[in-house]
Amino acid sequence: MSYDKFAEKQAYKKQLKKALRDAEFGAEAELKMTSLMDIFVNVLIYLLMNYSTSPVDVQQNAERRLPKSSTKNPIKMYITVGVTKKMILVNKKRVCEVQDGSIDASYKKDKKASSYVIMPLFKALKDAANKAKKLSRRNSSIKFKGEVMIVADRNMPFRLLAEVMYTAGQAEYGKYRFAVVKKGG
């Protein structure tokens, strides 16, 4: 083989490679929407799950001052029952009114003032328990443990606290946690 034919063959190979490269890079790139949507959904879920620095976000004000404690237990996600001087809330949704540190008899079971069951609170907690159980049946990594976080004023009357705890127990929430402010911080 002569040098001219060899050089010609090499030039032809270079031109062929260049043509293939140009055809490959010159083609219009398509944006796959499915992949892009997957990325955005993953980012959105990550941001929603990590938005709050604390699972329990409690605003203290004149209606609710939390007790102080030196606990070292970590905070976890629980269903929250908030009790202020004016209302009871479940996951920040108002369920009934509080008047002078007690619940009106019209909100109690059988409308008796002596009853410990607060019916609107019972209904809200029972609904939450049923949803949590349904979710745990569909996802084995999630377990319904019947734990509730009570966020209440430090000067709440004991009778009201007992009614809230008894009602939560009747709605299958038998384990209680109380939100407190860490001493010195």
Image (cartoon, grey):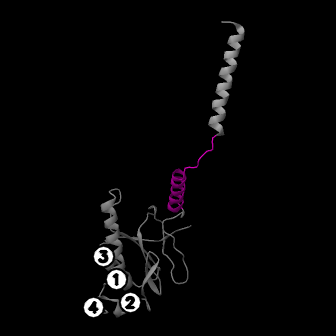
Front in this rendered view, residue 145 or 176: 145
Disc 4/disc 3 C-alpha distance (Å): 17 Å
Residue placed under numbered mark 1 in the picture: 163
Rounded to the nearest whole Å, what is the CA distance between mark 2 and mark 1? 9 Å
Q: Residue at x 28, y 77 (%)?
A: 170
Q: Residues within 10 Å of mark 2 (few under 14, many from 20)?
A: many
Tell me, yes or no, whether the two marked residues, 2 and 1, touch with CB atoms within 8 Å: yes
Q: Which residue is mark 3?
A: 171
- Which residue carries the number 4 mark? 110
The magenta region covers 27-50
Q: Earlier in the sequence, mark 2 or mark 3?
A: 2
Magenta stretch: residue 2 in it? Answer: no
Give x and y (percent) for residue 3.
71, 8
Q: Quadrant of residue 77?
A: bottom left
Q: How many marks?
A: 4
Give how far apart the Cα atoms at labels 2 and 3 are.
Answer: 18 Å
| CA neighbours of label 4 inside 10 A, class few (<14), some (14 to 19), many (20+) | few
Question: Can you give x and y, in whole percent of width and height, for residue 101 in the image?
Answer: 43, 89
For the stretch drawn in magenta, the main secondary structure is helix
Q: Which numbered dot is residue 103?
A: 2
Q: Decide: marks 4, 3 in contact (CB < 8 A)?
A: no
Helix, strand or loop at disc 1? helix
* Secondary structure type for disc 4: helix
As drawn, is 76 to the left or to the right of 140? right
